[in-house]
Amino acid sequence: MLAGLRARCGSSSPRVRLRGRPGPGFCDGGALAAVLARHCARALLIFGALLAGTLPAAGADDAERWLERMGSALRTENYVGVVTYVRGPEIDSVRVVHRVAGGREYERLIHLNGQPREIYTEGARSVYLQPQGATIAPHGVSLGPFTRTFHDNLALNRNLYDVTVGSAGRVAGRSAQQLLIRPRQGDRYGYELWLDQSTGLLLQSVLVDGGQILEAFQFATVDVGGKLSAQALVSTLPEDSEVHVLSDGPVEGGAAIPSRGDSVAESPSFEPGWLPDGFMRVRLEARDNHLSYSDGLATFSLFVEVAPADEMPDLVTKVGGTVMVTQRLSGSREQVTLVGELPAATAKRVADSVRRVDR
């Protein structure tokens, strides 16, 4: 069909000849042929794009629709697959089982590398499971855009990011659409996302700092939309495994917020004098001088040790998209440590601004 269309629109098309002088609203034969040629060329481009499934998106509205589809799919679709996670020199694989029943979400993340461990989520409650005597400290998994709140949090901070529709491609054997999320300032990271064209499910997430890839999540295999029974969510760990509550409430910025009596209403002894736009405090443990901040997409934590037993040298280290800054608080013995998902320059600026709060 495409070849036939080319034959009819190509240079071999017969000339159009008009008798007499052209009247108003008409053109001569050469001009009309040129107009037809331009329209045929445009038709070829559109038709070819339709055949390839890569018709260019219209702009911001299309980007918003893709984001909405992504947020909905992560919450409402049944899916099971294996996600590969690359962070600096670390490579991990996690089996993901997500089931929706009776309007309620159930999800189990099963780590396939290293010591056995799982994270089970039912509704807003998340727990971490590991065998008795395991040496890994309980913690959440920072899944970035794979979290259910990523779309909502991005919507609250759209003035800080530009979102555009990229190219079409293929991920995990499925047709996929690329979305580019770029910070408007250089004080935070961006994302490159690939969404399933059929369902909108996120298939791949790449954390980027300019043109540098820092971390990547990708489904290596995934089945979407099938029926899943409760049996699919059964734990693979022994019945006497340790269970640690990660969250009894919403998830913020891709990591579960612990439920052990934390409060943002307490008064901190230390706090930063500068924060990147959009970041706000989401957690405070005043007794330990531990504060956490998030813009909904990225998080970082601050720790101030009042009388460190061993002095640490000032340093800035980075693994994947996670940076650690540790340094002496200006004019005192206190040690400030910042750990989080920020560019090194931004993290250093926050750490430099930490001051004691006058009570």
Image (cartoon, grey):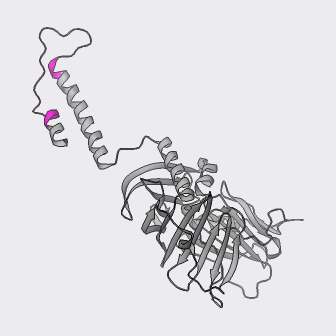
Q: How many marks?
A: 0
Q: Is 314 located above or below residue 133 in the figure? A: above
Q: Position of residue 280 (x, y in %)?
A: 71, 58
Q: Position of residue 121 (x, y in %)?
A: 63, 69
State the residue lying farthest toward the bottom: 133
Quarter-of-image position of residue 9: top left
Q: Which residue of the protein is positioned furthest toward the right in this rendering?
A: 359
Give the left or right position of residue 173, taking residue 314 as reference: left
Would residue 203 appear left or right of 291 to someone viewing this image? left
Q: Which residues are magenta?
A: 7-30
Residue 123 magenta: no
Residue at (66, 54) in percent of width and height? 278
Measured as percent of width and height from the top left, residue 276 is found at 65, 57
Please tell me which residue lies in front, 156 or 81. Answer: 81
Identify the residue shown where x is 58% and y is 54%.
Answer: 151
Q: Is residue 20 magenta?
A: yes
Q: Can I make out residue 147 in this image?
A: no
Q: Quadrant of residue 24?
A: top left
Q: Nearer the viewer, residue 22 or 255?
A: 255
Point out the image quarter for the N terminus. top left
Q: Where's residue 117, x and y in %?
A: 58, 81
Report the predominant secondary structure element of the magenta stretch. Answer: loop
Image quarter of the C terminus: bottom right
Evaluate whether residue 291 shows in this view: yes
Left or right: where 48 falls relative to 275: left
Residue at the image point whose x is 50% and y is 46% from the top: 65
